[in-house]
Image: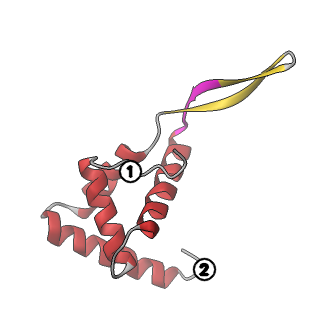
């Protein structure tokens, strides 16, 4: 949702869910949940200061942060996709993440 346009965001999500239902013949909620699980990171490195040095220490990602990062990465990957409408881009991105055929982390 950008600039508080909740009704536009809701309309786009519902359109994307309808497209997912048509293309995969699966429940769009299951596709969405599986895509979030496939994209969300399990570990991340955090800076840890020991003495005068700063080390990158791998730590497990909290569930709420994992979900936030997954949604952020999915939306940014959908924005970068070529397509006619954002609903089509989002549906295609979620279907691809369901199959795990392309990594979408924009920070990598």
Residue occupying the far top of the picture: 51
- Circle 2/circle 1 CB separation < 8 Å: no
Drawn side of residue 28 relative to residue 64, left or right: left
Q: Secondary structure at mark 2?
A: loop
Q: Which residue is mark 1?
A: 36
Residue shown at the point (30%, 68%) measured from the top left: 91
> Which percent across, then down, holds residue 57?
64, 23
> Which percent across, then down, holds residue 73?
48, 55
User: Please, is residue 53 above or below residue 26 in the view?
Assistant: above
For residue 26: magenta? Answer: no
For the stretch drawn in magenta, what is the main secondary structure? strand
State the extent of the magenta-drawn residues as a range.
57-62
Label for residue 4? 2
Residue shown at the point (41%, 66%) measured from the top left: 78
User: Please, is residue 43 above or below residue 67 in the view?
Assistant: above
Name the foreground residue: 75 vs 53. Answer: 53
Drawn side of residue 32 relative to residue 21, left or right: right
Q: Residues within 10 Å of mark 1 (few under 14, many from 20)?
A: many
Q: Secondary structure at mark 1?
A: helix
């Amino acid at each position: 949702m950008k600039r508080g346009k909740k009704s536009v965001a809701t309309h786009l999500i519902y359109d994307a869910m309808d497209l997912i239902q048509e293309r995969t013949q699966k429940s769009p909620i299951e596709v969405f949940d599986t895509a979030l699980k496939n994209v969300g990171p399990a570990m991340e490195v955090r800076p840890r200061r020991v003495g005068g040095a700063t080390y990158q220490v791998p730590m497990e990602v909290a569930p709420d942060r994992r979900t936030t990062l997954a949604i952020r990465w999915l939306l940014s990957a959908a924005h970068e996709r070529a397509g006619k409408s954002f609903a089509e881009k989002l549906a295609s991105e979620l279907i691809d993440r369901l199959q795990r055929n392309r990594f979408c982390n924009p920070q990598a």
